[in-house]
Image: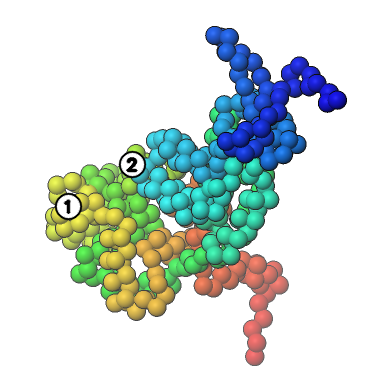
Amino acid sequence: MTARRGRGEGSIYWDEKRQRFIAAAVVGYTPAGKRIMRRGSGKTKTEARNKLKEVLRDHEDGLAIAPANFTVADAVRDWLAYGLTGRSAKTVAKCTGLCNTHVIPDLGARKLRALSATDVDKWLAAKAKTLSTATLQNLHNYLNRAVTRAMARDKVKRNVVALCGIPTGQPGRPSKSLNHAEATALLDAARGAPLEAYIVVSLLTGARTEELRALMWSHVDLDGLADVDPPIPPSMQVWRSVRAGGDTKTKKSRRTLALPGRCVAALRAHRAKHHGEETGLVFATSSGAELDAANVRRGFRSVARKAGLTEHNWTPRELRHSFVSLLSSGGMRIEEIADLMGHAGTRVTEAVYRHELRPVLLSGAVAMDQIFGGISEA
């Protein structure tokens, strides 16, 4: 004779319509006195009983509100819809594009509770064969934030994505800098071009492209004050950028830069053409609208081609890299260059922006020659 199931153990019955065994148990009652049931199904009684145990375990862990079929795609779409509040449209578009291209097609069908660290590791390893390390970091970040949001809303017990490391992806195109001859050729080729002033100011001040695109004439002083002590040179106030809210990248990036004479001359000629008259922008389209990245890229590459640099596939941001390397090659201290760049310290300036063609350290040789005396070869 089959033993009777104990109180609280629930029941198991056959569902003819679904052709599956159903294990059910009462976990409580509503304020109206209606029973709250939890169920698990399976092709066998054992499978149904095990599914019910999982449901009851989740209920005890506080995950009762999460549907059993809540998937990774559901978590990612929820984060895209509600977790990017206050972000710029460009940021939302970037996150949505990467998630729809790489996350949802590969992992979206997996139930979130069933997602394992091994699943994420294998996914990232496969992506590392075709994507850059920076893109892998973004994908890991987006999935991590989506699962963290789901965990905060009791959809899953833990975030397995946070346990996974990010593999090294494919190397991106390395940044480079112009040497003195190339920089001179570029400046010569820029004469008369629509972006002449932009290229001159970018190369000779090191300002970021998003800072120059947002530069206002009200923030540019082409005259300075020579009759005060100390004299105030012509300058520009780098206080804005095209980032969301108009803020610069960091607080340290908000700075005022003295303008070299060549920049002053280029800006005077540029202002005479009345660009940006309606909006007050220094660099604008022919209609006075703000330049976008594509505008600048097309204009810059046209000048680069004229200067004979096309084969290297140069980009506008490498004018900033060139600024650092040219100053460093000229002997300026890295601390001073970091201040001009708007960096909080020298680490980024050295690791990312300095590309000296001949990084010869002379101080040791000079000191030893002074101590022991230099000996020239016959």
Using a 10 Å C-alpha cutoff, classify the residue at mark 2 as few (fewer than 14 neighbours), some (14 to 19) or many (20 or more): few
Tell me the kind of residue under disc 1.
Gly
Judged left or right of residue 362, residue 101 is left
Write the residue at 37% across / 71% down: 183
User: Which residue is nearer to you in this view: 364 or 137?
Assistant: 137
Position in image of residue 121 (x %, y %): 65, 53
Query: If you read the primary sequence from the N terminus, does the residue marked by circle 1 or circle 2 appear first?
Result: 2
SS for callout 1:
loop
Instruction: Look at the image and tell me whether residue 197 can be seen.
Output: yes
User: Which residue is nearer to you in this view: 309 or 94?
Assistant: 94
Task: Residue 299: name its quadrant.
Answer: bottom left
Q: Where 365 falls versus 295 (above or below)?
A: below
Using a 10 Å C-alpha cutoff, classify the residue at mark 1 as few (fewer than 14 neighbours), some (14 to 19) or many (20 or more): some
The quarter of the rendered structure image containing the N terminus is top right
Kindly indicate whether the residue at mark 2 contacts the one at mark 1 (C-beta within 8 angstroms). no
Q: Where 233 falls versus 60 (above or below)?
A: below
Write the residue at 54% across / 73% down: 358
Report which residue position mark 2 lands on.
Answer: 246
Position in image of residue 367 (x %, y %): 65, 67
Tell me the kind of residue under disc 2.
Gly
Q: Residue furthest top?
A: 32
Report which residue position mark 1 lands on.
Answer: 288
Q: Residue furthest right?
A: 1
Position in image of residue 80 (x %, y %): 45, 41
